[in-house]
Every structure is written in C-alpha cells, then in structure tokens.
Image (tube, grey):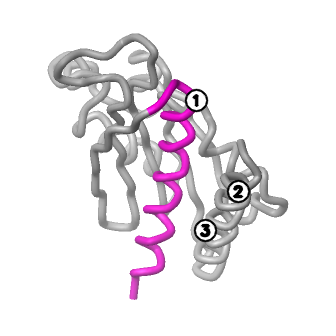
C-alpha cells in the first residue's frame, strides 16, 4: 500500500474509532473476497479492542452458512456474490457477534472467476446498524490486489459516512 493510501486508510479507521467509542458500539466484519483485510485495517489501530469485536473470514460457501447462518439455498439460488448473500452475511455477523455494527463484503477479486453477469471486480457490500441494513454493488478496476484494496477502503468509508450522518 502506498503511503498516501495507507494514510487515508489510517484516517478513516481513526474516524471510525471516534464514532464507535462514544456510544460504546462494537464492529464485526464478514469478509469473503478481502480475506480479513477490513479487520486487519481496523486492528492496525492501537486500542481497537475498545470498538472492534471480531472478523469472520467466510471465503467458502460452507463458511458463510456455518459461521453466519447464510441459508445455503440462498447461495445456490442467487450466488455467493449477490445482494441477498451480502445482506445475510451482515445480519449474521451482527447477530453472531452480538454487536451493533457490521460490514460484509462478497465479490470477485480475480483474476479468474468472473462471468458476463458478474465480471471480475464485482463486489456486493452490506452494512448493518441497529435496525438498519443496506447494500450496494460496486465494480472495481485493476488487478486482484487493487480490487481487494478498493473493497476494503469503500467498506470502511461508507460505514464512517453512515455513522457521521446518524442523529
């Protein structure tokens, strides 16, 4: 990661910590294509145990079902890289960890695995706050490392924006 990208990620994580600490909220991550990069960015910050609870690395479909309670029939019908699975991953992380806040990502980082309907760089995101889950699909350009880094950064930035917008 370049110094500029590293500085930006550090700034976003500091902002996240500042937003989660006052209400005493905790974060869990449910990660597929990033393999723990979001959790790693969070725990790079000293004192993150005040607000970061755990990360679920659910790379396989079985892990999504076993660890997060994602219905295997949902994965079979919609695919692992889908809005419904991302939503179920975020809800599962929030429920299984017993936290207020969760973020989930599932995507195709490449170089293989893409299709016409879901090309390499397709990532579904889901964020969960108390009483609210929302999703987004993004298409990132670049190699595997670039797709994964953009996924990490977008997941964290949107979470910070949502927390800042809360009353």
User: Foreground: 63 or 83?
Assistant: 83
Task: Work out whether mark 3 precedes mark 1 in sequence or the reverse, and give the earlier one.
Answer: 3
Decide: few, some or many residues near mark 3? Use Cα within 10 Å; few <14, some 14-19, many ≥20: many
Decide: few, some or many residues near mark 1? Use Cα within 10 Å; few <14, some 14-19, many ≥20: some
Disc nearest the viewer among 2 and 1: 2
Classify 71 as above or below 157: above
> Which residue has dot 2 on it?
4
Q: Quadrant of residue 84?
A: top left
Disc nearest the viewer among 2 and 3: 2
> Left of 40 or right of it: where is 102?
left
Classify 2 as above or below 118: below
Distance of label 3 from label 1 (alpha carbons): 23 Å
Classify 54 as above or below 163: above
- Element type at marker 2? helix
Classify 115 as above or below 64: above
Find residue 160 and report its horizontal and vertical position in percent. 50, 68
Marks 2 and 1: CB-CB under 8 Å?
A: no
- Element type at marker 1? helix
Question: Which image quarter is the C terminus in?
Answer: bottom left
Q: Is residue 87 magenta?
A: no
């Amino acid at each position: 990661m370049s110094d500029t990208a590293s500085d930006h990620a550090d700034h976003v994580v500091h902002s996240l910590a500042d937003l989660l600490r006052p209400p005493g909220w905790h974060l869990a991550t449910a990660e597929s294509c990033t393999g723990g990069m979001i959790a790693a960015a969070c725990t790079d910050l000293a004192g993150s145990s005040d607000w970061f609870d755990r990360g679920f690395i659910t790379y396989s479909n079985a892990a999504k079902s076993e660890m997060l309670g994602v219905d295997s029939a949902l994965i079979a019908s919609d695919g692992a890289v889908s809005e419904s699975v991302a939503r179920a991953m975020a809800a599962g992380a929030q429920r299984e960890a017993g936290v207020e806040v969760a973020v989930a990502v599932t995507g195709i980082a490449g170089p293989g695995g893409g299709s016409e309907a879901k090309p390499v760089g397709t990532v579904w995101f889901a964020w969960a706050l108390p009483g609210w889950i929302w999703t987004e699909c993004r298409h990132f350009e670049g190699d595997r490392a670039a797709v994964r880094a953009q996924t990490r950064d977008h997941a964290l930035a949107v979470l910070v924006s949502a927390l800042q917008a809360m009353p």
